[in-house]
C-alpha cells in the first residue's frame, strides 16, 4: 500500500553528506508548505508544532545532532499510458528494472522507496542486511525489497492481493539470476490475520521496511498495529515517508509514543523523512 499522490516528475535521491548522530526523541514536525499541509497549522496551535531537529547541511559537523540532509534530483517524466515504460535504477552495482502501472497506487515507485534504497546502499556498515531477515510492508513495486536482496538479506515482500502480481514479477525478474537468498512474496492486509499468517513462534524479523505507507487513508490504525506486531526487541523499523497531510504527523506522533524513534535523514525538497524505530525496553 503506497502513496496516492501522482507526481509529474520522479525524485531520485543521492546522499550529500555522511551519516550524523540523531536526536533520541522526535516531536511533531510541522513545516507545512503546501495547501494540503496548511490544514495542519489550522488544527494545531503553534506552540505544539515544534521541529524534531534542525536541518543539517552537507558540511555539518560530525558531532551535530541533526539528521543527514539528502539532495533530491528531479529527472523522470511519466508518459500518458496505462503502463509506464520499464524504469531502470542502479543500486549496489546492479541495474534494477521496474515495471510500473497507474492502475494501482502500489504499482508506482514513490519518493520514499528511492530514499530508503539509496540510504541502505550508502549505509551498509550501519545497517548490515547480509543474512538478516527482512520484512517489507506495503512493498509496492518491490524496489526496496530488491535492494535488500542484493545486500544479502532474506526478504519477505508483502502487499495487498491486487498488487502481488506486479510485485512478484519485478522481484522475480531482478533476482532470479543473482547469487542471493531467494525472496518471498506474500499477501499482507494490515491488521488482518497477523497471528494466523505470520505466527510469532515461526516468523521473526531483524528489519521491518516501509516506504510511503502513511498518507490520507483509513488504514493507519491497522498499519500501526501491524508495525507493533512485527517489531519485537531487537527489530529495527526503517520508515521513509513524504509528509504532506495532517494524518502523516498524527501517525508520527503515535509512532513516537510507542517506539524509540529517531530521524535518520531528510529530503527537504520533497518533504521525505527517513526514520528508525525500535521497541522500548522495560
Image (spheres, rainbow, N blue to C red):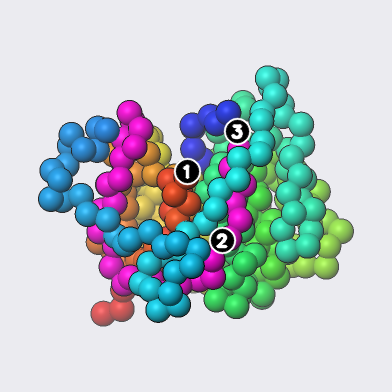
Q: Position of residue 279 (x, y in %)?
A: 36, 71
Question: Is residue 2 left or right of 9 when viewed as pictured?
Answer: left
Q: Residue at x 39, y 44 (%)?
A: 243
Residue that numbered label 1 is attached to: 270
Question: Where in the figure is residue 20, as x and y percent of width and height?
Answer: 45, 72
Answer few, some or many: residues within 10 Å of disc 2's Cα (few below 14, many 20 plus, some between 14 and 19).
some
Task: Reply yes or no: does residue 18 show up in magenta.
Answer: yes
Point out the residue furthest to the front here: 59
Q: Would you say 101 lies left or right of 56 here? A: right
Q: Classify 171 as above or below 201.
A: above
Q: What residue is disc 2 on? A: 16
Give me the residue at 77% from left, 67% from top: 180
Q: Residue at x 47, y 43 (%)?
A: 270
Sequence-earlier tag: 2 or 1: 2
Against 49, is 77 above or below?
Answer: above
**Occupied quadrant, residue 178:** bottom right
| Circles 2 and 1 in contact, beta carbons < 8 Å | no
| Stretch of the chain drawn in magenta | 10-37
Q: Is residue 2 visible?
A: yes
Mark linked to residue 9: 3
The residues bearing labels 3 and 2 have C-alpha atoms spaced at a distance of 21 Å
Disc nearer the start of the sequence (3/2): 3
Amino acid at each position: 500500500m503506497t502513496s496516492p499522490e501522482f507526481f509529474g516528475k520522479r525524485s531520485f535521491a543521492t546522499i550529500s553528506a555522511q551519516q550524523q548522530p540523531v536526536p533520541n526523541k522526535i516531536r511533531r514536525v510541522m513545516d507545512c508548505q503546501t495547501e494540503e499541509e496548511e490544514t495542519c497549522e489550522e488544527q494545531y496551535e503553534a506552540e505544539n508544532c515544534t521541529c524534531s531537529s534542525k536541518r543539517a547541511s552537507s558540511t555539518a559537523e560530525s558531532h551535530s545532532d541533526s539528521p543527514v540532509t539528502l539532495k533530491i534530483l528531479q529527472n523522470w517524466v511519466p508518459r500518458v499510458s496505462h503502463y509506464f515504460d520499464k524504469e531502470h535504477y542502479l543500486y549496489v552495482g546492479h541495474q534494477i528494472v521496474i515495471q510500473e502501472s497507474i492502475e494501482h497506487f502500489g504499482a508506482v515507485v514513490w519518493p520514499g522507496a528511492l530514499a530508503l534504497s539509496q540510504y541502505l546502499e550508502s549505509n551498509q556498515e550501519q545497517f548490515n542486511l547480509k543474512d538478516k531477515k527482512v520484512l517489507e510492508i506495503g512493498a509496492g513495486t518491490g524496489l526496496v525489497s530488491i535492494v535488500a536482496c542484493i545486500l544479502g538479506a532474506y526478504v519477505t515482500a508483502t502487499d495487498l492481493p491486487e498488487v502481488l502480481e506486479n510485485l512478484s514479477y519485478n522481484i522475480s525478474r531482478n533476482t532470479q539470476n543473482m547469487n542471493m537468498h531467494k525472496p518471498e512474496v506474500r499477501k499482507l492486509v494490515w491488521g488482518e490475520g497477523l497471528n494466523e499468517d505470520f505466527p510469532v513462534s515461526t516468523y521473526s524479523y531483524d528489519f521491518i521496511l516501509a516506504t510511503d505507507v502513511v498518507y490520507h487513508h483509513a488504514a493507519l490504525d491497522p498499519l500501526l498495529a501491524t508495525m507493533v506486531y512485527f517489531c519485537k526487541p531487537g527489530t529495527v523499523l526503517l520508515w521513509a515517508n513524504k509528509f504532506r497531510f495532517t494524518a502523516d504527523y498524527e501517525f508520527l506522533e503515535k509512532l513516537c509514543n510507542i517506539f524509540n524513534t529517531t530521524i535518520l535523514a531528510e529530503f527537504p525538497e520533497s518533504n521525505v523523512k527517513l526514520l528508525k524505530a525500535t521497541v522500548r525496553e522495560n
